[in-house]
Amino acid sequence: MTRFSAAFAAVLLTCASAPVLADAASHAADAERFLQLARADKLAVPVYAQVQQMFAQRFAETGAGKDKQAVLETYQAKANTELDRAVGWDKLKPDMIKLYTSNFTEQELKELISFYQSPLGKKVMEKMPTLTAQSAQITQGKLEAAVPQVNKLLADMSSELGPKKP
């Protein structure tokens, strides 16, 4: 009789877990759909651009001529390959899906998807990069006024703490 009980329990657990697994798959699919709408696969683009700019700047600092442009392009391509290995969308996507499924219910993701498919949601996605950049500029401008005071506070704290101990 115990074999029967164990087998019955196993079947019961399997049947009970099937909807949970289906729900998890559906939840993950909704997170992936939202991430597509939110263009999350483009999150690392600024990183790539910044690295490309670093190589271009270093190239310019060396004073290398146009005849060495191919060297720059070769190293930029190698840098892109390294970035792909670290932050390519295929590397980020599983973690991003986990992040969104752990922070939003399946219903919330469905609502986000619905919003981002609406005309207003599409407008938000279109305007967000510009709004984010302009917001950063506004913040940076306001922050500049605090820099002298913060630097003075750092200096005052350093003075109060005394000389650096060996």
Image: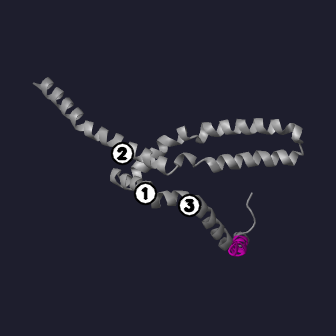
Q: Which residue is mark 1?
A: 118
Q: Regarding mark 2 in the picture, which secondary structure is present there?
A: helix
- Image coords of residue 124 (percent x, y): 51, 60
**4 w.r.t. 96: above or below:** above
Q: Which residues are magenta?
A: 144-156
- As measured in the structure, the alpha-carbon distance from the residue carrying label 3 to the one carrying label 1 is 14 Å
Asked if labels 3 and 2 touch by Cβ distance under 8 angstroms, the answer is no
User: Which residue is drawn at the image coordinates 13% and 25% (left, top)?
Assistant: 4
**Callout 1: few (<14), some (14-19), or many (20+) C-alpha neighbours within 10 Å?**
few
Q: Which tag, 3 or 1, sits closer to the chain's start?
A: 1
User: Which residue is drawn at the image coordinates 64% and 70% (left, top)?
Assistant: 138
Q: Which residue is mark 3?
A: 127
Q: Residue furthest left?
A: 1
The foreground one among 122 and 82 is: 122
The foreground one among 33 and 54 is: 33
In terms of image quadrants, where is residue 17? top left
**Amino acid type shown at disc 2:** His
**164 w.r.t. 141: above or below:** above
Q: Which tag, 2 or 3, sits closer to the chain's start?
A: 2
Q: Is residue 49 left or right of residue 16?
A: right
